């Protein structure tokens, strides 16, 4: 078993205001076993990872990012990537996987980079909080969660692409 404390929700298509622009939404909060290795594979959709604790190395299109707590990595859909988890501690990661018309320009902007990704080793606290909030809202689904997630995604992706 590679993970513990795993929470996952998958919406296809997402309900409410996310539906017109997002065909698929997955939200995950999990801890992955130290030393785990995941071979190269194609990422099906735009994915935004937040490292909460532990460490991991992600290789995308021949570029490597070493991330610790507080790092955010956004990877374009269709990019080939692999991951290695640090040997010393569980890797606690939260992430969103998104597909649909709304993600196309974001994927295109990320593919414009040789790495097909954007890496922020010390993402600002506001960015980290938005990713955490979006994941938690999608997992718990309180009243009007879709509107809140739509707002958080818009702000997060704007920041990722403009900085």
Image (cartoon, grey):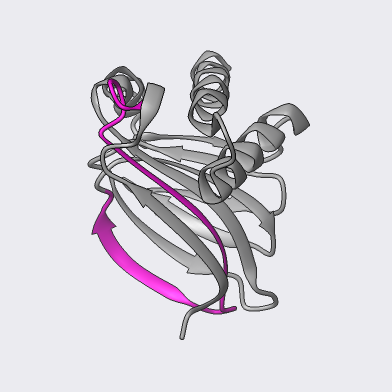
The answer to whether 18 appears left or right of 133 in the picture is left
The residue lying toward the viewer, choosing from 77 and 112, is: 77
Q: Is 2 rendered above or below residue 19? A: below
Residue for point 25% across, 29% down? 100
Query: Residue 74 colored magenta?
Result: no
Quadrant in the picture for the C terminus: top right
x 65%, y 44%: residue: 71
Q: Position of residue 132 (x, y in %)?
A: 65, 42
Residue 92 place in picture, x, y as percent: 63, 63
* The quarter of the displayed image where residue 29 is located: bottom right
Residue 79: where, in percent of width, then height?
27, 43
Q: Residue furthest right?
A: 125
Residue 90 in picture, x, y percent from top left: 65, 73
Q: Is residue 68 left or right of residue 140?
A: right
Q: Nearer the viewer, residue 81 or 155?
A: 155
Farthest residue, direction front: 143
Q: Which residue is painted at 67% across and 30% down in the image?
A: 127
Magenta stretch bounds = 18-43
Q: Answer whether residue 19 is magenta in the image.
A: yes
Answer with the quarter of the image where residue 117 lies: top left
Q: Would residue 57 be found to the left or right of residue 87 on screen?
A: left
In the rendered picture of this protein, how many numbered marks are placed on residues? Answer: 0
Question: In terms of depth relative to the viewer, which is nearer, 93 or 113?
Answer: 93
Q: Residue at x 31, y 29 (%)?
A: 22
- Please state if 142 lies on the left or on the right of 38 as rendered: right
Near-viewer residue (143 or 88): 143
């Amino acid at each position: 078993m590679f993970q513990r404390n795993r929470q996952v929700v998958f919406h296809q298509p997402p309900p409410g205001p996310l539906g017109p622009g997002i065909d698929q939404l997955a939200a995950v909060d999990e801890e992955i076993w130290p030393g785990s290795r995941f071979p190269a594979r194609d990422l099906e959709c735009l994915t935004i990872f937040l490292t909460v604790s532990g460490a991991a190395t992600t290789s995308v299109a021949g570029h490597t990012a070493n991330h610790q707590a507080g790092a955010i990595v956004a990877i374009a859909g269709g990019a080939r990537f692999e991951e290695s988890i640090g040997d010393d501690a569980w890797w606690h990661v939260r992430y969103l996987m998104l597909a649909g018309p709304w993600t196309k320009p974001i994927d295109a902007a990320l593919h414009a980079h040789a790495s097909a990704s954007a890496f922020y080793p010390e993402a600002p606290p506001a960015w980290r909080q938005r990713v955490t909030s979006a994941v938690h809202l999608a997992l718990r689904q309180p009243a009007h969660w879709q509107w809140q997630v739509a707002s958080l995604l818009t702000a997060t992706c704007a920041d990722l692409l403009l900085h």
